[in-house]
Image: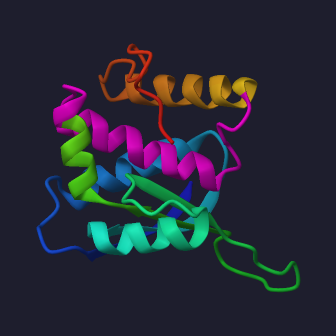
Amino acid sequence: MNYHIDLQVACENPLPFPEEKLINWAQSALLAHKDSAELTLRFVDSDEIRTLNQNYRKKDKPTNVLAFPSVIPPHIELDFPFLGDVIICPSVLAEESREQEKSLESHWAHIIIHGVLHLLGYDHIEAEDEKRMQQEEIQLLEQFGFSNPYNEEDNHLE
């Protein structure tokens, strides 16, 4: 397995977890799907993610994660298939973990895995797809000792 994960920190506060841990969570989602891949994990402030959410989803509010799958023309050869960018807002994750009474670490792991799964083609628009994605997330989170993040009915991601 050969993965390249580019971490970009574009927010004021330092990240609450070591880079190695963030990369391990992202790689866990890749292992069952790709032998090699490249992606970007970008950590931003609420203003940047709000702007992206407004521009791409027409929702004028900050969100926890956005995923932008890449569209590389087939004639371009890359050493690693570039999957795209996962944009994460640490301040939203901190607020959500407090509100939902989850550990910050389990919530971070969940959201990173969730974003990478989007780059792999998972979505949660239709109920059947949502169930498939949630099952994959639960299984991956269990590998790190984290419990099911969907135990509460109102715990769904946007």
Q: Position of residue 82 (x, y in %)?
A: 64, 71
Q: Position of residue 127 (x, y in %)?
A: 70, 25
Q: Residue at x 27, y 47 (%)?
A: 93
Task: Residue lying at the far bottom in this picture: please name it.
Answer: 76
Image quadrant where residue 106 sits: top left
- Above or below residue 6? Residue 137 is above
Q: Please give the range of residues in magenta.
A: 98-126
Q: Position of residue 27 (x, y in %)?
A: 47, 50
Residue 30 visible at all: no
Left or right? Give the position of 102 relative to 69: left
Disc tally is 0
Tell me how the rendering is colored: rainbow
Verify whether residue 45 appears in magenta.
Answer: no
Q: Residue at x 37, y 52 (%)?
A: 64
Left or right? Give the position of 28 relative to 134: left
Q: Which quarter of the figure is the N terminus placed in?
A: bottom right
Q: Residue at x 39, y 18 (%)?
A: 148
Left or right? Give the position of 135 relative to 72: left
Image quadrant where residue 14 sits: bottom left
- Above or below residue 25? Residue 41 is below
Residue 29 visible at all: yes
Verify whether residue 100 appears in magenta.
Answer: yes
- Above or below residue 158? Residue 81 is below
Q: Relative to the observer, which residue lies in front, 152 or 113?
A: 152
Q: Position of residue 21 (x, y in %)?
A: 27, 50
Magenta-colored segment: predominant secondary structure:
helix
- Above or below residue 50? Residue 139 is above
Q: Residue at x 29, y 37 (%)?
A: 107
